[in-house]
Image (cartoon, grey):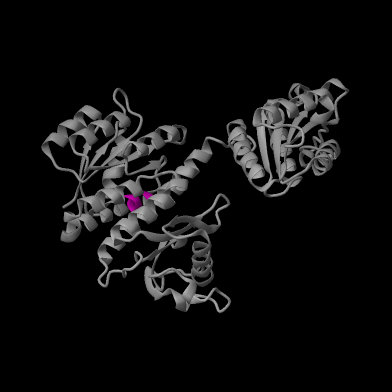
Amino acid sequence: MEKILVVEDDRFFREMYSHLLNGEGYEVHTAASVNEAMGLLRETEYQLIISDLVMPGETGIDLLFQVKRHNPDIDVIMVTGNTNVETAIHALKNGARDYLLKPVNPDEFRHTVALCMEQRRLLNENSELKGLVHLFQVGQTIANCLEIERLGTLVVDCFVNELGTDRAVGIFPDEDGRLSLREMRGIGFEEAELISDTLLTRYSNSTDTFWLRERFVDLLPPTALPATQLSEGMDEVLILFVRSKKVLQGIVALFAPEGSFLPVDINQRSLHFLQNQTSLAFENAARFASARNLLYIDELTGLFNYRYLELALDRELKRAERYGSSVALLFIDLDLFKGVNDTHGHLIGSRVLGEVGALLRKSVRDVDLVIRYGGDEYTIILVETDAESAAFVAERIRATIERHGFIADEGYDIHLSACVGYACFPEDTKSKLELLEAADKAMYRGKFSGRNRVFRALLEK
């Protein structure tokens, strides 16, 4: 019987987790502290530890480090509250299998434990995989990767090494989440692009295929280059599909080395194992991204917060430089907002700020980013927007705020005005810091010029 150790200082949660796990047929032991848990670990072999992250004295992180020194093969699942998401991410990076948020959903709890145990059974029951230590290590490396940008490289390298080939193409989500050509090994760009386009056309809607072995020339559309122009050995392809919760996350196409052939007998168990690890990695990366996003969301308005501003600007300015486009940054400051708090109270003031955020979101496109900078200040990143368009949007926002009656459905009908300053990249500025400073100064020019104004940074020069 599989043994699980529950480490939780709160008796209620200890008993709840034990009840859920006993109902699934596990042998469950409990400990109220890290010290007690380490004592049990010296006496009993456990497959899994479920530990609270925050406990008096030594914490769940302390336990994780001690467990990994004691027996690296024991899986650890952390349980934490929303306020400790950063610490949970730190735990994942240091070897924790997964984490759960309090209050724990019983179904999610059972599913997470079952998934962990299934992964362990796959390793323990398959004698062939037991001997493939290197394969396990590679799979763990993939499964523990939390940066979705690195996953494609790891996955392609993994399958290339397993099949003993040196030519491959990897199709994974780009910055906008669209599947596109991301990885190439031993294949020129034009040929790789042809492979990517062909596979996406044929298989982007595939829902249940695990892998296919095909003659690539048979997959080519009639308009493609003649098969004779393909490099030697490219006529046959092994296509592997990567899915997370039935959603296609990637396609890896493997070709034989030049002058050779793909193996006749392919170790399907190894491929299944690595694909399972890859799927787990995409799930973990998605959860990591979701947890990370919690750090960038303003609780009051639901908008992105100031932490996200510089990250987003870095991304959009690089994109603008790559494609030769423009980016506009708007700084918006509500005029005399303190009077709303003084007259109606901070509760109503907070609701007004939330309504301003909703109004701003409706005033721009879905691709634009609205950010609450702090207090009664907001910023908006307008992608692929030149100075003329930015001026139009800025004026529309100013006029919309001026016309709107806030909390009107409850009889308040509060009226506000705002100053909007904007700057454009690369027309007005050449760097992120210059763009931020220029838009901010333009906004303050409006404040000092009588409020309810729109100013462009260029006029500051």
Total numbered labels: 0
In front here: 202 or 353? 202
* Residue 343 location (% of width, % of height): 78, 23
Position above or below: 26 against 438? below
* Residue 383, quarter of picture: top right
In front here: 238 or 50? 238
Which residue reaches farthest left?
43
Query: Is residue 370 visible in the rendered structure shown here?
Result: yes
Position above or below: 191 against 119? below
In the picture provided, is 420 more to the left or to the right than 310?
right
At a point 76% along the width and 36% down the height, the residue shown is: 427
* Residue 123, quarter of picture: bottom left
The C terminus lies in quadrant:
top right
Position above or below: 399 against 2? above
Which residue reaches farthest right?
450
In front here: 41 or 440? 440
At a point 49% along the width and 68% down the height, the residue shown is: 199
At a point 41% along the width and 37% down the height, the residue shown is: 89
At a point 23% along the width and 35% down the height, the residue shown is: 67
In the picture provided, is 334 more to the left or to the right than 13?
right
In the picture provided, is 70 more to the left or to the right than 10?
left
* Residue 275 location (% of width, % of height): 34, 59
- Residue 418: say if magenta: no
Residues shaded magenta: 108-113
* Residue 217 location (% of width, % of height): 46, 76
Q: Main secondary structure of the magenta part?
A: helix
* Residue 312 location (% of width, % of height): 61, 38
